[in-house]
Amino acid sequence: MSGGQAYGFASQSRRVQNTVPPKVWAEVVEVYQRALRSIWWLGMGLSIICFCLVWVEKSIPLRKELNTQYGIDEKNQTEEKSSNVIEAEEGKELTETENKA
C-alpha cells in the first residue's frame, strides 16, 4: 500500500479479499477505518475553527464609488466624445441640406 497504491488496492478489494487470510484482512480494514476516522475529525475540527473565526473577522464597508486607473473612465469619455462628434456632424449635414432647399 505504499507509494500511493492504497486507492488502487482498495478498489480491488473484492479480488484481494479472497487471497488474503481473514486475520490480515481484518487488520487492513481496521487501518482504513482509523485513517478515515482521523481525517474526518481533523476536517471537522478545522471546519469548526474556521466557522468560529468568521464571527471574529473584521467587517470592511464596501465602496460606493469606483476609483479606477485601468482606463475604464477614459474609455467612457472617449465614447462620449465620439458620440458628440457624430451628433455635431449630423447637425452640420442637416443645416447644409436646409440651406440647399
Image (spheres, helix red, strand yellow):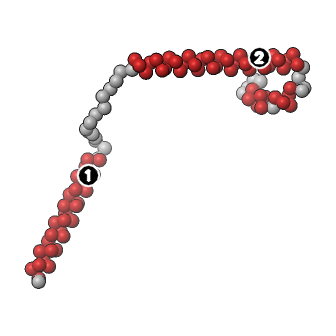
Q: Which percent across, then down, holds residue 19?
A: 90, 26
Where the C terminus falls, by quadrant? Answer: bottom left
Type of amino acid at the residue the image marks with label 1: Asn
**Cα distance, mark 2 to mark 1?**
66 Å
- Marks 2 & 1, CB-CB < 8 Å contact: no
Residue at the spot x=27%, y=51% of the render?
A: 75
Residue 60 in view in this figure: yes
Residue 5 in view in this figure: no
| Mark 2 nearby-residue class (10 Å; few <14, some 14–19, many ≥20) | few
| Occupied quadrant, residue 42 | top right
| Occupied quadrant, residue 8 | top right
Residue at the spot x=11%, y=82% of the render?
A: 100
Residue at the spot x=15%, y=69% of the render?
A: 91
Image position of 29 (left or right of 85): right
Q: Which residue is mark 1?
A: 76
Secondary structure of the residue carrying numbered label 1: helix
Where the N terminus falls, by quadrant? Answer: top right
User: Which sits in the foreground, 72 or 17?
Assistant: 17
Residue 30 is tagged as 2
Q: Which percent across, then down, holds residue 73?
A: 26, 47
Q: Which percent across, then down, holds residue 21?
A: 90, 20
